[in-house]
Amino acid sequence: MTDISSLLVQPPPSWPEKYSGIPARLADIGNQTREKIYAGRSLPRVAPRKQGEELPVLPPDITRERFNEAVAELRKEIGEANVELNDKPLVDGWYMEHPNTHDAFHILEQDDTVSSATIYPGSTEEVQTTVRWANKYLIPIYPISMGRNLGYGGAAPRIRGAMVLDLGKRMNKVLKIDPDNCSCLVEPGVSYFALYEAVQATGYPLWIDTPDLGGGSVLGNAVDRGVGYTPYGDHFGCHCGMEVVLPTGEVVRTGMGALPGKDGEDNPCWQSFQYGYGPYNDGIFTQSNFGIVTKMGFWLMPATEHTSYLITFRDEDQYPQIMQTIRPLAINKVLGNVPQLRHVIQELAVTGKPKSHFYDGEGPIPREVIRKWAKDMPCGDCSWVFYGTVYGPDDFRKGQLDIIRREFGKIEGSRLMLPEKLPQDHYLHSRVSVCSGVPVLRELDWLNWLPNGAHLFFAPIAPTSGEDVKKLFELCRKRHEEYGIDLFPTLCVASRESHVIVNLVYDRSSPASKKAAYDCLRAMISDAAAGGYGEYRTHILFADQVANTYNWGGGALMKLNETLKDALDPNGILAPGRNGIWPERYRGKGYEIFPGDQRTSSLPPHINA
Ligand code: EUG
């Protein structure tokens, strides 16, 4: 066991001292969370690098001499300290102290998807300088906003030895908060924690929208098309205007931003009208490698009253009926936000206690054991828990809640509970915060399920229908049983569709645990595609497989993406392989990873040798 006392002497980094830190209001939670995570960790905090490999690890097709020359040149252009070689031991850290050198939740070996260096640009101009430099030396660069894309690859580049372009460290300003237009303009290094504090400091009655965890980048999450839980939960849908550096170094502003304001000011409608004139290009800069987003506008919701509730459902097999009840309520907007439907196992996991507290046997925790524990918890002996929120004045919310009670009441054994009736540490109180735009840190707790806990997401989209969700759950259950993994499903219901989120928790110290999670995810992606279901987002190492499932019309979509990629990034320097899009220089040379490859490395064998 690591000596954890030495890790806990200093409090976690706090905001605003550190842009990516935790605000004072969450300091205690931060300490407790870190303590719990390290208590379950047996891996050494600092891992020595592999014997015999010269550091930093270089990107493909470049000599060390040329690499060193390139680094020296970039340092001269943007400052010595702003190019940092990745030649030190790797530290996984934890959520608030996460690495920008590799994926903290490594699913292959820890040093597989490592960078060669990290670059810290301080302005859009320095991003342009860096991009032009990368074109000169043909060095792949991998932009991150803050690097907290955890469960999807974190900060790790898809190409081993690429340089990580860490935008957030020096570009972390809230550029504007407009109380009349109800909007903001931010840089990549603004977290939900930071934006929330900035809005609070203005005193304006505005909400931000936050995902389950508040440490991520507002811009980065939207660019990966993430989801939050207020009525503004569609982060891409609620953005308005971008500034983007193209892979060849030009800067564009999208939407109304393309029309210069009077006397060189930003266009006054940049955060008011999303589309501007001509083709709507914003979409091609999300989940892609076509540009580096350096500024992004977002709409902010006027603050309102709200009530969160939970509804428990008795039987495991009631979920098709639950989904059929949800669909019309969601489409008619009686459900005010993106509600979650969680399996009861999550009630155990979100307590933050390890699996071993509940069960010391082998394999997945049996249903009867979950039942035994749930019986004495506030949710009682149930199978599914629905977390929802209604918004607006008292009579609005009362009207909506009456309908919700009536409709869900038709499902035998269902029970609705309000926050007042639940103990202070119940997860519903965390939902009250998240669903009213107050970013929190609670959701990490289920990482403690296994020692050295790490996770991967399986995130397919299903129609909000009982039959479809049943098919997906059944394939997940079958594969989880096959690979001996506990099934943690959460449905995030947008309205017509649901993001079916399955958290695969694994033990980073165990090659067998990693392999089971890896193989299970590959199998589920294939099974889902065979049934016509596709993921909305995936881990960098699964991107080729997922992109290849979107293959209607003989791969017409990927052909279009490749055409765009080659036109915009002729040298293929920007995030090669991101979302399965490979530039011409790398395409078809063995970089792609498909199921059945039995690859143990992200690089092709000829590079790896
Ligand atoms: C969650 C939701 C997501 C996602 C990853 C995790 C929720 C976990 C809706 O998108 O991509 C409880």
Image (cartoon, grey):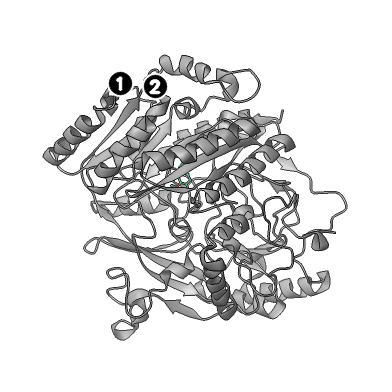
Q: Name the residue under label 1.
A: 413
Residue 429, position in %: x, y? 34, 32
Looking at the image, residue 388 sits to the left or right of residue 371; the answer is left
Ligand 1 under 8 Å from disc 2 Cβ: no
Question: Mark 1 is on which residue type?
Answer: Gly
Q: Are marks 2 and 1 in contact (CB under 8 Å)?
A: yes
Residue at 53% x, 38% y is 475
Rendered position, 346 above or below 273: above
Task: Characterize the local packing of mark 2: few (<14), some (14-19) or many (20 or more) Cα atoms within 10 angstroms.
Answer: many
Quadrant (top left, top right, bottom left, bottom right) of the N terminus? top right
Q: Name the residue under label 2.
A: 382
Q: Is residue 66 visible?
A: yes
Question: Mark 2 is on which residue type?
Answer: Cys
Q: Which of 74 and 442 is in front in this view?
A: 442
Rendered position, 277 above or below 307: below
**Can you tell which of label 2 and label 1 is closer to the viewer?**
1
Badge 2 or badge 1: first in the primary sequence: 2
Residue 194, position in %: x, y? 41, 52
Which secondary structure, mark 1? loop
Q: Which of 102 and 398 is in front in this view?
A: 398
Which secondary structure, mark 2? loop
